[in-house]
Image: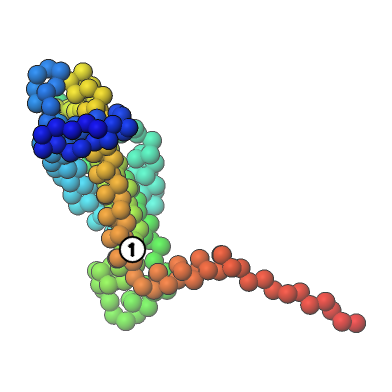
């Protein structure tokens, strides 16, 4: 067992994983003489989350209104598809290094790169979610006197929320992972232990990766719970009924004709 004063006991059989956990919870002296691990990991996590949340907030402010408007207008599929394809085609590391090369280092520049990474899933899912609302439901609402804004607010947006939150969830996980490149642009995030093993050692590299993975899993689980919570009961019931039909298909008996 590895044990120290007021330190968490780490089973020896965990090996490198145990060293990484010890790095996360306890400070130590790095190879350059600096204090690393412990509270420093908390500081890195705070910076990582600040960068992530700032990028996500701007991406949602930009992507959601455009996607919802295009879906409501039942046009602009070319824009949505193009944005989605660009988001899939351009590697995230390329966006970060491009902004670093053109605009220089700094929190704002790296954040803008992450905004571009986050917008495509948000915009595309918002467009798809609103666009796929049953046109008959929209026509009925219009016939009852609802304005365009009223239809969006009371009909299309509630029905599109599950897909919208799906896009937010995808973007959040991508941004959390890509924010590890922040140190390359002068923003010291949880990527610092991962890309600087000469200072942090293998324990720091694995420890930083574990914290990033934990943040990504927490975002996935938390936003999935929100996605389920905002799904209208009618859609949940329809989904369960469809699942039962797929699982237990009803076959019709063929009756032989009588002569």
Residue at 14% in and 36% down:
7
Dividing the picture into quarters, in which one does residue 99 lie?
Answer: top left
Q: Position of residue 196 (x, y in %)?
A: 21, 22
Q: Quadrant of the C terminus?
A: bottom right
Picture coordinates of residue 13, whole percent (x, y)? 32, 32
At 27% from the left edge and 72% from the top edge, which residue is drawn? 154
The location of residue 227, given as percent across then percent down, is: 31, 60
Q: Give the quadrant of residue 108.
A: top left
Secondary structure of residue under mark 1: helix
In the rendered structure, the answer to whether residue 108 lies left or right of residue 225 reads left
Of residues 49 and 117, the one drawn nearer to the viewer in this rendering = 49
In this picture, is 192 found above or below 213?
A: above
| 181 to 201, vertically: above or below | below
Q: Is residue 199 left or right of residue 202?
A: left
Q: Which residue is mark 1?
A: 228
Q: For this rendering, which residue is in front, 203 or 13?
A: 13
The quarter of the image holding the N terminus is top left
Of 173 and 12, nearer the camera is: 12
In this view, the residue in front, 86 or 78, is 86
- Furthest-right residue in this view: 259
Vertically, is 253 above or below 87? below
Say which residue appears at 29% left-offset and 80% top-offset. 145
Can the viewer see residue 217 in this picture? yes
């Amino acid at each position: 067992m590895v044990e120290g004063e007021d330190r968490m006991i780490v089973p020896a059989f965990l090996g490198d994983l145990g060293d990484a956990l010890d790095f996360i919870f306890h400070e130590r002296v790095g190879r350059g003489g600096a204090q690393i691990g412990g509270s420093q990991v908390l500081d890195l996590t705070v910076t990582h989350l600040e960068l992530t949340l700032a990028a996500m907030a701007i991406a949602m402010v930009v992507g959601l209104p455009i996607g919802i408007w295009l879906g409501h207008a039942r046009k602009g599929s070319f824009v949505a598809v193009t944005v989605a394809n660009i988001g899939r085609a351009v590697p995230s590391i390329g966006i970060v290094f491009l902004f670093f090369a053109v605009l220089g280092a700094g929190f704002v520049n790296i954040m803008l790169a992450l905004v571009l990474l986050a917008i495509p899933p948000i915009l595309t899912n918002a467009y798809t979610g609103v666009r796929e609302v049953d046109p008959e439901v929209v026509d009925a609402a219009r016939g009852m006197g609802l304005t365009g804004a009223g239809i969006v607010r009371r009909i299309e947006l509630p029905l599109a929320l599950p897909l919208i939150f799906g896009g937010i969830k995808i973007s959040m996980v991508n941004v959390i992972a890509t924010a590890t490149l922040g140190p390359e642009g002068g923003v010291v995030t949880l990527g610092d232990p991962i890309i600087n093993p000469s200072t942090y050692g293998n324990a720091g590299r694995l420890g930083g990766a574990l914290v990033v993975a934990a943040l990504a899993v927490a975002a996935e689980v938390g936003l999935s719970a929100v996605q389920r919570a905002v799904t209208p009961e009618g859609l949940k019931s329809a989904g369960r009924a469809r699942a039962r039909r797929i699982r237990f298909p009803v076959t019709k008996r063929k009756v032989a004709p009588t002569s």
